[in-house]
Amino acid sequence: MDKETLLNHELVPKHEILSEKDAKKILEKYGITKKELPKIKTNDPVIKAIDAEEGDVIEITRDSPTAGKTKYYRVVIPA
C-alpha cells in the first residue's frame, strides 16, 4: 500500500509528530515522562509513512461516536 493510500484510509486515524515544545506540554499536563507513554514501534506502517523517528511523541486523533474526537499519545521505540 502506498503512503497516500495508507494515510488516507478510513480505518487509519490521523497520526501527527508533535514538536518538542508540544510534546513537553502534553507530558507536563499529565505529569508523566516519555517512558510512561504507551509505545509504538518504528516498523509500524503509519510511523514509517510519516517519517517518525525513535523518541518522537505521536498524537493520534480518532473519531469517537460518543466523544466526537479523542486524542491518544504514543512514543516511538525501536522495532
Image (tube, rainbow, N blue to C red):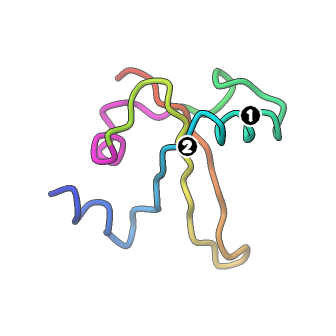
Circle nearer the N terminus (1, 2): 2
> How packed is label 1: few (under 14 Cα within 10 Å), some, or many (20 or more)?
some
Would you say 32 lies left or right of 6 here?
Answer: right
Name the amino acid type tagged 1. Answer: Leu
Q: Above or below — where is 54 with respect to 28?
A: above
Furthest residue toward front: 21
Judge left or right: residue 77 versus residue 50: right
Residue in view at x 32 percent, y 40 percent = 51
Residue contact at pointers 1 and 2, CB within 8 angstroms: no
What residue sits 66% from the left and 63% below the top? 70
Residue at the spot of label 2: 18
Q: Nearer the viewer, residue 20 or 3?
A: 20
Please provide the residue range marked out in magenta.
Answer: 40-50
* Residue 10 appears in the picture as rendered: yes
Q: x and y percent of residue 73 in the render?
A: 61, 44
Q: Residue at x 36, y 42 (%)?
A: 47
Q: What amino acid type should be assigned to the residue bearing mark 2? A: Leu
Q: Is residue 25 left or right of residue 46?
A: right
Residue 31 in the image: above or below residue 44? above
Tell me which residue sits at (48%, 51%) in the image. Answer: 16
Q: Nearer the viewer, residue 65 or 5?
A: 5
Q: For numbered disc 2, what is the local secondary structure?
A: loop
Give the structural element (helix, strand or loop) at label 1. Answer: helix
Residue picked out by circle 1: 27
Counting from the top left corner in percent of width and height, residue 9 is at 31, 69
| Residue 1 appears anywhere in the view | no
* Quarter of the rendering occupied by the N terminus: bottom left
Q: Quadrant of the C terminus?
A: top left
Residue 49 vs residue 23, the one in the foreground: 23
